Image: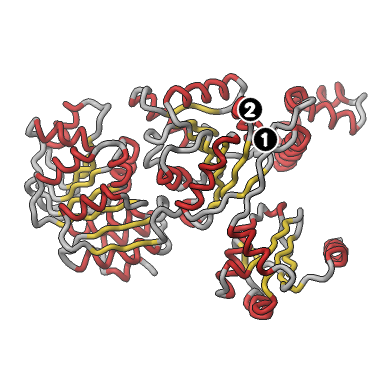
């Protein structure tokens, strides 16, 4: 669906087209028509990264009268980073309204400058609760003209102790205003706000509350507590192209982990509340521009962090509340892309992982920390790939080559390769020489998926698919492909076996023909894949490799 189908003003459609939005997300399709239709209070439940800002931002821009300098729209959110991100998005949505004034107010910045900005006239304010109340008490902001009040990530504001501040803010707004509450989860405190300040609200939901996105792979690694940092390093080294966000529980631990990573030569920096606003802005600028590879952060500091293409979220510690895990892993797999959320736990914390699965409706894949040899192989292949794909400016480099070629003329091709590889690769060989297995032993759990596999065992049809680990295929991707295409339940999918260049999966025989028919000509991540009944494994492998050769 295109945004033009909602009846939005031409200026908004122009802005959306300029931003390159090709279609709407489920939360936008449900929320925008409701918000434009009348004086309806809305409760929107959607995971992070699903387009919530546009879901309420575009209707807000439509309904505000930019010919008037009066404050009409108010958005309250938990952190400075989210406040700035929302403000930036709204300004882009309103870019073709010449008299639009959208201002952000938040703690940690010069309040006098913010007062100056507000007094110039503003139609929309985006604010953190504490700073907004400070401006109200100083009579710099009046809320009695607010027509639309929006609480974004209300659950997190309540987790951070802003209940009284939110009450104080909403009490000063008109009783007949529209109130739109958006949240990834719906705790009791948020429901109480809805009961107190909203009139017959309509609840819309894109996905189940407290659930994570389907395109996120969840992995758990169990190690001894003393090996937690070593495990983190090994996972980073095993993923050379990682662009990741590492969550720690406290500010002190965030700084400590970041310091260790930087000392060990990683491109990492911390983000936490003890940094000045200028320092936080500088770190975020580098991360958004991808000149920073690893951001180590607390939950509060990373709240509202909106950065594209984060490949991994690493939970160095489990969060205290299950809802926070939903918010953490929502930093990856945004806008329909895939991502991975990794959890590091010690043996005593395995029980908490099981509880998290139950409350969040997800399943963790228990994996082993890679061996030192596996890490070295991964780094070597990645380095060779970078070497092959490097652009060569022959015209400019050739004049410098004669003395270099003369110096290297006595070396064979194999010796040249060994020496060039060793320049960068020796440090990995030195570090991982004699590396021990740091995986902790954990009792095998009997999960719902295990029970489903047992249930269909012996009554299954095996399928072959011509993609595997080399294509970065995950088990969840196969389950989604099969279930979405054929409409069968995931309980009818049995064992999945990922190989390097191809894979196998089982389904109940009763639905096998249906699955085969629905997967003809199917595409996975834009690539057409081949799915067929599997022969015996050895024959399938031989046939596949013969075809490739």
Q: x, y percentage for residue 338?
A: 55, 53
**Mark 1 or mark 2: which is in front?**
1
Left or right of 260? Residue 90 is left
Q: Quadrant of residue 387?
A: top right
Q: Quadrant of residue 205?
A: bottom left
How much space separates mark 1 and mark 2, taking CA atoms? 9 Å
Mark 1, residue position: 440
Q: Residue at x 62, y 67 (%)?
A: 523
Left or right of 165? Residue 306 is right
Q: Is residue 249 above or below residue 359?
A: above
Are the residues tagged 1 and 2 within 8 Å (C-beta)?
yes
Q: x, y percentage for residue 455?
A: 66, 68
Q: Residue at x 19, y 55 (%)?
A: 195
Q: Quadrant of the C terminus?
A: bottom right
Q: Residue at x 52, y 32 (%)?
A: 292
Q: x, y percentage for residue 168?
A: 13, 40
Q: x, y percentage for residue 475?
A: 64, 57
Mark 2, residue position: 227
């Amino acid at each position: 669906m295109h945004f033009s189908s909602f009846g939005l003003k031409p200026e908004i459609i122009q802005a959306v087209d300029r931003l390159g939005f090709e279609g709407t997300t489920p939360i936008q399709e449900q929320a925008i028509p409701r918000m434009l239709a009348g004086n309806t209070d809305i409760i929107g439940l959607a995971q992070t990264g699903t387009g919530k800002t546009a879901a309420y931002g575009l209707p807000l821009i439509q309904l505000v009268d930019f010919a008037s300098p009066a404050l009409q729209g108010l958005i309250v959110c938990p952190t400075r980073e989210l406040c700035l991100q929302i403000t930036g998005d709204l300004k882009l949505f309103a870019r073709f309204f010449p008299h639009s004034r959208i201002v952000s107010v938040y703690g940690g910045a010069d309040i006098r400058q913010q007062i100056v900005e507000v007094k110039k006239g503003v139609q929309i304010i985006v604010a953190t609760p504490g700073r907004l109340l400070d401006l109200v008490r100083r009579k710099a902001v009046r809320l009695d003209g607010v027509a639309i009040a929006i609480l974004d990530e209300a659950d997190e504001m309540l987790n951070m102790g802003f209940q009284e501040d939110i009450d104080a803010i909403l009490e000063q707004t008109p009783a007949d205003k529209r109130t739109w509450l958006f949240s990834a989860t719906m705790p009791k405190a948020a429901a109480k706000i809805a009961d107190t300040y909203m009139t017959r609200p309509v609840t819309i939901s894109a996905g189940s509350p407290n659930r994570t996105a389907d395109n996120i792979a969840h992995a758990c690694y169990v190690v001894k507590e003393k090996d937690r940092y070593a495990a983190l390093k090994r996972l980073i080294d095993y993923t050379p192209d990682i662009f990741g966000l590492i969550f720690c529980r406290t500010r002190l631990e965030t700084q400590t982990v970041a310091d260790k990573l930087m000392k060990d030569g990683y491109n990492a920096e911390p983000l936490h509340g003890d940094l000045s606003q200028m320092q936080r802005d500088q770190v975020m600028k580098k991360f958004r521009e991808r000149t920073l590879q690893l951001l180590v952060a607390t939950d509060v500091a990373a709240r509202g962090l909106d950065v594209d293409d984060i490949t991994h979220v690493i939970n160095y510690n489990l969060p205290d509340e299950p809802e926070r895990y939903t918010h953490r892993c929502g930093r990856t797999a945004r806008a329909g892309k895939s991502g991975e959320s990794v959890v590091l736990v010690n043996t005593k914390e395995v029980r908490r992982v099981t509880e998290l699965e139950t409350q969040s409706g997800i399943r963790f894949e228990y994996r082993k920390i890679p061996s030192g040899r596996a890490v070295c192989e991964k780094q070597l292949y990645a380095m060779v790939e970078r070497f092959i794909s490097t652009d060569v400016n022959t015209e400019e480099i050739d004049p410098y080559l004669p003395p270099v070629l003369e110096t290297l003329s006595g070396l064979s091709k194999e010796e040249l390769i060994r020496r060039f590889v060793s320049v960068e690769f020796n440090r990995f060989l030195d570090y991982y020489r004699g590396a021990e297995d740091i995986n902790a032993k954990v009792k095998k759990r009997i999960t719902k998926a295990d029970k489903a596999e047992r249930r269909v065992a012996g009554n299954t049809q095996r399928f072959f698919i011509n993609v595997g680990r080399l294509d970065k295929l995950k088990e969840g991707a196969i389950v989604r492909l099969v279930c979405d295409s054929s409409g069968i339940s995931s309980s009818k999918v049995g064992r999945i076996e990922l190989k390097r260049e191809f894979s196998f999966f089982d389904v109940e025989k009763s639905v096998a023909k249906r699955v085969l028919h629905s997967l003809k000509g199917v595409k996975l991540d834009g690539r057409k894949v081949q799915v067929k009944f599997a022969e015996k494994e050895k024959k399938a492998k031989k046939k596949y490799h013969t075809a490739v050769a």
